[in-house]
Image: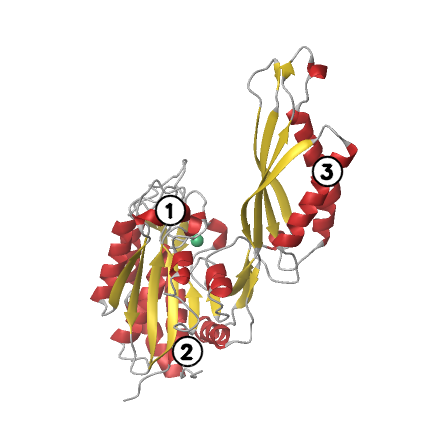
Amino acid sequence: MYRVPDDIVERISSRVESMEDEIVSFLRDIVRIPTENPPGRYYRECAEAIGNKMREFGYEVRYFDVPAERLGELAPHGEGLPRVSVIGRLEGRNKKPVLHFTGHYDVVPAGGNWTVHPFEGAVKDGKIFGRGSSDQKSGIAAQIFAIEALRREGIPLLGTVESGATPDEETGGQAGVGYLVEKGIISKENTDFCVITECLDYDKVCIGHRGTLWFEVKTKGRKSHGSMPALGINAIEKMVAVMNAFDTRIKPKIRQVKTKYPVMPPQARQSSLTATVINAGTKVNTVPDECTAQFDWRLVPEQSVSSSYEELVSCLEHIRKVDPEFNYELRKIMEVDPTLVPTDTEVVRAFLEAGEAVLGRRPEFSLSPGSDDQKYVVKNAGLDQCIVYGPGPLALAHQTDEYVEIKDLVASTKVMAVATVALLGVDMQ
Ligand SMILES: [Zn+2]
């Protein structure tokens, strides 16, 4: 790893500062493209706006479309709309190593009750507002302008930068980074370092995320008239038994597992099992024969999907043993094991040191409470040197009146630029 001299840090800092208006204006341009997912609208428009900017900055730009025949499988919620990723490549003289930045350009639906228009990119009090302003079109703007600052400052890189923007992270990422990894476009062989530019706070280096087990329980009974409930089997009452069993048999156990890792926010440092959807019944005077409920179980790094699932099955089987009328089906909706990367790697050191040089204090480590595209790069592509770093406060993701502070956007752009120099080296010729 290359040690970045102080004068280069200074030059990068002032160059990025001089580009502030341009960075802000590009971010506002892409916030104005309402890439709400689901279902995933205006993807091509957004990918092209990002691709055009990279082309303007000298990248070789390629687009990767999920073929139509696989849309149903990889984007079942997507109403057949296109799923397109864009990657720009800027080669240095040595070609290697390769640093790949990637950010998702899809956003969660705006929802109601905004005090500003969610897709106007309003600027107020040093903040840019809008859905995606933080999560995470800000990261895409930062990754592109970090490299542009180096180019304009005349700091040529020895290695290669790739900069990608992908869809569908908000619905699992299978048609975005998942697809690029599956196709070998991001692989251990062609990529040395990867930085996912999610909004995990500009002064933290994120080294992983918690796991997720989403599942559905269906209890089955027998219909009867509401005036003669004894003739039926009430599926709602059976679901109450399920929830009580979770409360007494699973929750006390998982509450004891406090992770030793720096998950943010601290309230997310233990596992949680939460009922999120419930459906049953059709009429006030009919005993329902079916009740379905969905649950969101978040796992700390000390847990795994397989052992949690086993626990679930054993809990439901226990109910069946004591209640012969208990009849259920269990279905997984989504499973993601926790992801955690080693902290003694070059990519982690480069960002810690760049953070310290730019911000004047060493960034802390963090772990995301949710899950993100890092899982595909680390688990499916097998690339350990993959971190998450980007502007935008994690706490504001998916909220009403989402915003990013312009000063954080600028600071993270500087950190990315300095870390890139450290990882790829400068061509002195
Ligand atoms: Zn995100």
Instruction: Give the label on residue 389, or none.
Output: none
Disc 2 secondary structure class: helix
Instruction: Give the label on residue 245, or none.
Output: 3
Which residue position is annotated with label 2? 423
Asked whether the residues under the numbered discs 1 and 3 touch, taking CB atoms below 8 Å apart as contact, a structural biologist would say no
Task: Give the distance between the C-alpha atoms of the residues marked 2 and 1, in whole angstroms.
Answer: 32 Å
Does residue 390 appear in the picture of this structure? yes
Q: Earlier in the sequence, mark 2 or mark 1?
A: 1
Q: Is residue 393 left or right of residue 123?
A: right
Dividing the image into 4 quarters, which one contains the N terminus?
bottom left
Viewer-proximal residue among 331 and 25: 331
Residue kind at label 1, given as amino acid type:
Arg
Which residue ends up furthest to the right in the rendered image? 322
Q: Indicate which label's residue lies in the foreground, 3 or 2.
A: 3
Q: Position of residue 45 (x, y in %)?
A: 25, 50
Disc 1 secondary structure class: loop
Q: Position of residue 247 (x, y in %)?
A: 71, 40
Instruction: Give the label on residue 131, or none.
Output: 1
Q: Position of residue 103 (x, y in %)?
A: 38, 59
Residue kind at label 3, given as amino acid type:
Ala
Dividing the image into 4 quarters, which one contains the C terminus?
bottom left
Viewer-proximal residue among 168 and 35: 168
Asked whether the residues under the numbered discs 2 and 1 touch, taking CB atoms below 8 Å apart as contact, a structural biologist would say no
Q: Earlier in the sequence, mark 3 or mark 2?
A: 3
Q: Residue at x 36, y 44 (%)?
A: 36
Q: Is residue 315 left or right of residue 396?
A: right
Look at the picture and state if 40 lies above or below 194: above
Residue kind at label 2, given as amino acid type:
Leu
